[in-house]
Image (cartoon, rainbow, N blue to C red):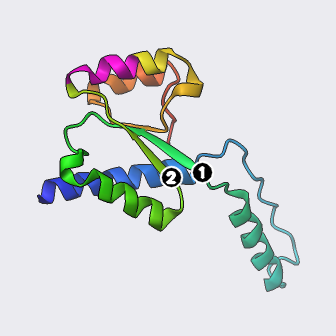
């Protein structure tokens, strides 16, 4: 049970990272000025501007292989809690476990507009999908 909760927590962290950094537009931070240090209201305004620049997605799509994040392991409760806490709809795509990588490959081959926001991959698949540009570089 601890392992399941640990994996769910890791999944939540991954989703949070993706949802927080999903915007392609980058806000340019203004350079430091001589009077910025002397005027604290400028710093507050700058902070508010940066916070407004992040766009909250309406929905996140996640493709899982069915070994951890299953309906039997309270997937529905997790999705409900996620949506309640974040205000972001979570769509879970869960193909049959035996056909997961075939379905994932077909999904990636169908074009970027059909790609899920989050996927679960075995280590063997990361380099191939990264070389194809299908994965977001988090470094």
Q: Nearer the viewer, residue 103 or 136?
A: 103
Q: Which residue is mark 2?
A: 89
Q: Nearer the viewer, residue 138 or 48?
A: 48
The local crowd at label 2, few if under 14, some if 14 to 19, many if 20 or more residues have their Cα within 10 Å, is some
- Residue 104 in the magenta stretch? The answer is yes
Q: Quadrant of the N terminus?
A: bottom left
Left or right of residue 45, residue 122 in this image: left
Looking at the rendering, which quadrant does residue 50 occupy? bottom right
Image position of 98 with respect to 69: above or below:
above
Dot label at residue 8:
none
Number of marks in the image?
2
Mark toward the start of the polypeptide (1 vs 2)? 1
Q: Does dot 2 land on a helix, a strand or a loop?
A: strand
Outermost residue on the left side: it is: 1
Q: CA distance from mark 1 to mark 2?
A: 6 Å
Q: Are marks 1 and 2 in contact (CB under 8 Å)?
A: yes
Residue at 32% across, 37% down: 64
Q: Position of residue 77 (x, y in %)?
A: 31, 59
Q: Position of residue 6 (x, y in %)?
A: 22, 57
Residue at 46% across, 49% down: 90
Task: Identify the main secondary structure in magenta.
Answer: helix
- Residue 96 in the magenta stretch? The answer is no
Q: Position of residue 117 (x, y in %)?
A: 49, 38
Q: Which residues are magenta?
A: 98-105
Q: Does dot 1 land on a helix, a strand or a loop?
A: loop
Residue at 73% across, 44% down: 25
Image position of 103 with respect to 60: above or below:
above
Looking at the rendering, which quadrant does residue 69 occupy? top left
Q: Which residue is mark 1?
A: 58
Residue at 18% across, 53% down: 4
């Amino acid at each position: 049970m601890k392992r399941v909760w640990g994996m769910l927590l890791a999944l939540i962290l991954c989703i949070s990272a993706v949802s927080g950094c999903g915007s392609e537009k980058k806000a340019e931070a203004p350079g430091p000025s001589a009077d910025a240090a002397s005027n604290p209201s400028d710093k507050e305004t700058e902070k508010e501007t940066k916070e407004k620049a992040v766009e909250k997605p309406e929905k996140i799509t996640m493709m899982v292989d069915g070994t951890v994040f299953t309906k039997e392991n309270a997937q529905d409760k997790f999705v409900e809690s996620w949506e309640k806490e974040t205000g972001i709809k979570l769509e879970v795509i869960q193909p049959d476990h035996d056909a997961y990588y075939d379905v994932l490959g077909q999904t990636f081959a169908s074009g970027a507009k059909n790609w899920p926001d989050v996927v679960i991959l075995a280590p063997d698949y990361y380099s191939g999908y990264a070389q194809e540009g299908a994965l977001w570089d988090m470094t």
